[in-house]
Amino acid sequence: MLQAQPSTLPTLTKRQNSALKNLTIMGYLEGTSFLLLLGIAMPLKYMLGIPEAVKYVGMAHGALFIAYILVLLIATSKIKMPLWAMPAGVLGSFLPFGPFIFDHLLKKRLRE
């Protein structure tokens, strides 16, 4: 019969959990803004001639991109992340759905 074993996984401190949560939130916001820019604002500009959508969504995305990179730097310093995490996080921010995939892979790796 199998018995439950105590977890030997390293647990994150409150400070590390907070940094990871902030990174997740910023990643989701940045990724969503990028998808809105590509999927809604750009078609509105180029298909319907409404350039204001790109102007405002693009500005918001730019600000969220910078905030995401800063939060990634902070999280990297607070959490012992794998060596690939920082470049992968930056690369993921340039790809559609990249921040979502990065977040999933990072959390999976931190659980190992």
Image (cartoon, helix red, strand yellow):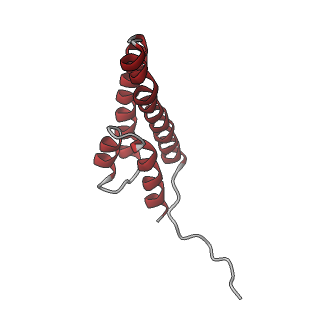
> Does residue 51 appear left or right of residue 24 in this picture?
left
Residue 62 position (above or below residue 111)? above
Q: Residue at x 48, y 54 (%)?
A: 107
Residue 68 position (above or below residue 21)? above
Q: Residue at x 47, y 59 (%)?
A: 108
In terms of image quadrants, where is residue 44?
top left
Picture quarter with the N terminus? bottom right
Q: Residue at x 49, y 37 (%)?
A: 28
Q: Residue furthest bottom?
A: 1
> Does residue 39 appear left or right of residue 82 in this picture?
right
Q: Residue furthest front?
A: 47
Q: Residue 39 in the image: x percent, y percent?
A: 44, 30
Along the viewing direction, whichever of 44 and 106 lies nearer the viewer: 44
Q: Residue 71 in the image: x percent, y percent?
A: 40, 35
Q: Residue furthest right?
A: 1
Residue 112 position (above or below residue 51)? below
Along the viewing direction, whichever of 81 and 95 lies nearer the viewer: 95
> Does residue 52 appear left or right of residue 2 in this picture?
left
- Count how many numbered circles sit on residues in the image: 0
Q: Residue 85 in the image: x percent, y percent?
A: 34, 51
Residue 69 position (above or below residue 92)? above
Q: Residue 90 in the image: x percent, y percent?
A: 31, 41
Q: Residue at x 42, y 42 (%)?
A: 99
> Does residue 56 appear left or right of residue 14 in this picture?
left
In terms of image quadrants, where is residue 68?
top left
